[in-house]
Amino acid sequence: MNIFEFTANFGSEDVCRQHFKEERDKIGIVCKRCGHTEHYWIKSKWSYECKSCRSRTSLRSGTIMQSSNLPFLVWYKAMFLLSATKKGFSSKEIQRQLGFKRYEPIWAMIHKLRKAMGNRDDRYTLEGMIEMDEGYFTIEASEIEHNTQKSGRGSKTKANVMIMAESTILEDIETGKVERQSRYFKAKVLDDHKAQGTDDTLKAAIDDEQVIVFTDKSTSYINIADYVEIHITEKSSEQTTKETLKWVHIVISNAKRNFTGNYHKIKRKYLQLYLNEFVYKLNRRYFGEKIFDRLVIAGITGL
């Protein structure tokens, strides 16, 4: 969807609000008080009323717009900007594009959308063959690190991120050439370099133990063979990076380039949110114009 189509389809507050209601109706409403799923629509209040207990649920309640005073039109414009490009926008740039004087509400809105993206992707698991490796992302040093390193404001440090790629080996019937293709990805910030954190991250990313995992020979991966079908390790080398762990390193490289080009600085506690946006759009790289519609759904269900 280009900007002209967006303006034609979502040019007013009423249109955006009505569209949000239609999408929420498709998903369904569950009463928070009694769990009933049938409701009346009270248009004068823009709320649902449970047919069983008469409890009311506002249109925003239970979605990322809950407790937000920003108009639906502003939310829709923000979702359009986030979905319009692979590279993304900083909150500061979106504030400028929306013409808002205050930065704080726009910053909060964008981070809520990024959280919804991550929650939506957490519903899906990886299967088959999985490449897995860690990347070190530059972030702003915390106050403790500033004091420890005796460095000035704006100093940098590194955060450890686990990247996983669901890959498939394909062989050309005529040439016999073998290539790896990748479908879905996950990226999670790790608290440390211990095996426990790695194990928990991988277990949460897979549906069952019937997977084949490719890694290097890091000591963080010593337990993986205990809970997957096959764990294949190779010593880190240029060949491993280009072949066995090809896709995870492509993602690490692209994500770092994306962050450096778009964001002035990223704090550790927000790094996962930026990764959520990057991976969400990467996993939907073939969706085209539908990614905006998917983001609206994520806003309804991904609180």
Image (cartoon, helix red, strand yellow):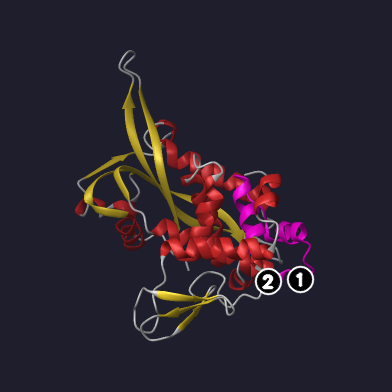
Question: Does residue 265 appear to the left or right of 210 in the view shown?
Answer: right
In this rendering, does residue 37 appear at all? Answer: yes
Q: Is residue 154 magenta?
A: no
In this rendering, does residue 275 appear at all? Answer: no
Q: Which residues are magenta?
A: 75-104
Neighbour tally class for label 2: few under 14, some 14-19, many 20 plus, Cα within 10 Å: some
Q: Position of residue 205 (x, y in %)?
A: 34, 55
Q: Nearer the viewer, residue 263 or 42?
A: 42
Amino acid under disc 1: Arg
Q: Mark 1: which secondary structure?
A: loop
Residue 174 image label = none
From this view, report whether residue 241 is shown above or below residue 108.
above
Q: Nearer the viewer, residue 244 or 45?
A: 45
Q: Is residue 81 magenta?
A: yes
Residue found at x 41% / y 35%: 237
What predominant SS class does the magenta segment belong to? helix
Q: Mark 2: which secondary structure?
A: helix
Q: Nearer the viewer, residue 100 or 88?
A: 100
Q: Position of residue 144 (x, y in %)?
A: 59, 73
Residue found at x 30% / y 53%: 206
Amino acid under disc 2: Pro
Neighbour tally class for label 1: few under 14, some 14-19, many 20 plus, Cα within 10 Å: few
- Label count reads 2
Residue 102 image label = 1
Q: Are marks 2 and 1 in contact (CB under 8 Å)?
A: yes
From this view, report whether residue 27 is shown above or below residue 31.
above
Residue found at x 65% / y 65%: 14
Residue 105 image label = 2
Quadrant for residue 248, please give it: top left
Question: Does residue 67 appear to the left or right of 282 in the view shown?
Answer: right
- Which quadrant does the N terminus fall into? top right
Disc 2 from disc 1: Cα separation: 7 Å
